Image (cartoon, grey):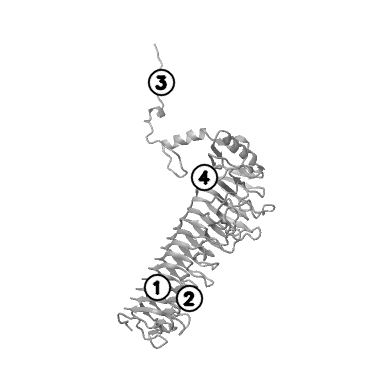
Amino acid sequence: MYSSPAPRSSPCERRPPLSTPIDQWVPGMQVTAGRLQYMLERLSESLTVTSYGATGSGTVDDAPAIQAALTAVKKVGGGWVIVPPGTYLLASLPLRIYRNTRLTLLPGARFVRGIAETMLLNGDANQGFGGYTGHGNITVEGGVWDCQGAAPGLKSAAMCISIGHARDITIRDLEIRDVAGYHAIELNSTKRALVDNCRFLGYIDTGQRDFSEAVQIDLAKSSGVFGGFGPYDHVACEDITVRNCYFGASGTAGTTAWPRGVGSHSATITRWHRRIKIAECTFEDLPQYAVSAYNWEDSSVTACTFQGCGSGVRLRTVILTDKEDTKTPDGTQTNASQDMRNLAVTGNTFRSGTGYDDVITALGETSGLILNLAVTGNTIDGNSKGQNGIRVQRTSRSTIGPNVITNVSGTGISAGDSGNLTVTGNQLWGVDANGIALTRCDHSSATANQVREIGQTGLLVSDGNDIQLKTNYVRAPGRAKTAMYYGIRISAPASSVTVTGNKVRPYGSGAEAIHAFSAEQNVTFLHRYGNDFRGSTWTGNAAMNDSSTSPSTSAADLT
């Protein structure tokens, strides 16, 4: 009698159990059996916007359908909303996204703004979540977000993505194009946010908005600062990372590159943005500051590339003349700035700056110093309009160097009204103005720097007290005009200056400095020894001209 064979197990049933559990899958991660299983399980929990009526045709308003999907996951406490490939016209805005939501635009998906409004906002206009208690734990990933800021009817200022009163925000793998007036991404009153691998292309100035940042980091100061919703409790941002992003132009007619890449332009006394990290980003042809760290603390700009920008990095305490920013949260006018501290600009490359401001600049106020600053490991190659390579003003406990600075049209390193400053190990070459200039600086030193073929004076000390110039090498100062400048120059009323172990040499032909070393009258307590100032082409007929008051020499200078 014939009997049917026993059922055979499927290949899946014979497969051994999966090994390591998968917590999450990240785009770009190798697809293993375990990860594929995870993806399938999560897809079963997801909502696809086409299931809610979105067409992806680019001809009808798909915003209501997409909003229906976002609202559906809100009702169940969160979920995953998926946007398949297609072009989605958004003419009913803003879209509102809520806590515990992941919004994924798959490759080939494109959002196109069809009304002059913000595209995406985390929450409702009438909500009242203060601090960081609003709609958070949100991921937005993928797709092209085309704001069409140069299109007729869409030139009014608006955001692309606006986030406020939230924590745990991830925005990754987006391309945001042609924003009008405001910002591509605003992070306001937000804690723990990541902006990763995004492209910010194209901007249009809607009028007096030539300072807009692609990514703005701001605080809940007022409806004029953040219009999405209140409360306006002056909560600042903390723990924000922007990495692997590109900032530049889109090429769309009527648009430009972004004026600024990442930054802030509002402040409140007693509040700071803290732990902001900008890393491995590229900024290209931005006309103003690529990074503007206004009232930031415990923050860094690391391993970024700046090409053709007006200025690279600006670090700025609260501006004393800004009458809104110098108020406390209760509205009391302080007429004062405030200190900001612990900042690092490290390992960046700056090329072909266009001279809007100094390449790296750190500016404090009389009532608000920049404290604990490190500017190290940077390469600056070229700028224009007489701007400096590195400029610090009203700082304390700062370290500048080692850095490489070449082809700068102003002074290589300029420091003013600062104390406890260390300028060490820098290489400066082909600088049009002074090599290193210290003006009204106290308890500071310039040590082991190499300064070559400088237009004006190699090392310049003007005013200041307790300054040390040690083991620096200066060659070919004064190349801009013969008999005008110096290798090392100490100007009155500087006091208590030590000059030791330095070596200065002329070029040997053409424009030359007056002296290798010069100290003006009324320079007091000058102490110099062990320097090498030899050379026969100094135009002042002597290598050294010390006119200071009773200089002290404990070891013979070489002349």
Please name the residue that numbered disc 3 is placed on: 7
Give the residue type that dot 1 points to: Asp
Element type where label 3 sits in the image = loop
3D distance between C-alphas at marks 1 and 3: 92 Å
What residue is rendered at 65% in x and 58% in y? 206
3D distance between C-alphas at marks 4 and 1: 47 Å
Q: Give 6 or 100, whichever is nearer the viewer.
A: 100
Which of the two discs, 1 and 3, sits closer to the camera?
1
Give the residue type that dot 2 points to: Ala
Mark sitting earlier along the chain (4/1): 4
Q: Are marks 2 and 4 in contact (CB under 8 Å)?
A: no
Mark sitting earlier along the chain (2/3): 3
Please identify the quadrant where the N terminus is shown. top left
3D distance between C-alphas at marks 3 and 4: 53 Å
Element type where label 1 sits in the image = strand
Q: Which mark is residue 323?
A: none
Please name the residue that numbered disc 4 is placed on: 167
What residue is rendered at 36% in x and 76% in y? 499
Please name the residue that numbered disc 1 is placed on: 466
Mark sitting earlier along the chain (1/3): 3
Q: Are marks 2 and 3 in contact (CB under 8 Å)?
A: no
Would you say residue 84 is visible in this rendering?
Answer: yes
Mark sitting earlier along the chain (2/4): 4
- Tell me residue 296's x, y (percent): 50, 57
Q: Is residue 305 above or below residue 445?
A: above
Element type where label 4 sits in the image = strand
Element type where label 2 sits in the image = loop
3D distance between C-alphas at marks 2 and 4: 47 Å
Give the residue type that dot 4 points to: Arg
Mark sitting earlier along the chain (1/2): 2
Q: Which mark is residue 433?
A: 2
Dot 3, how many residues are within 10 Å of its Cα: few (below 14), some (14-19), or many (20+)?
few
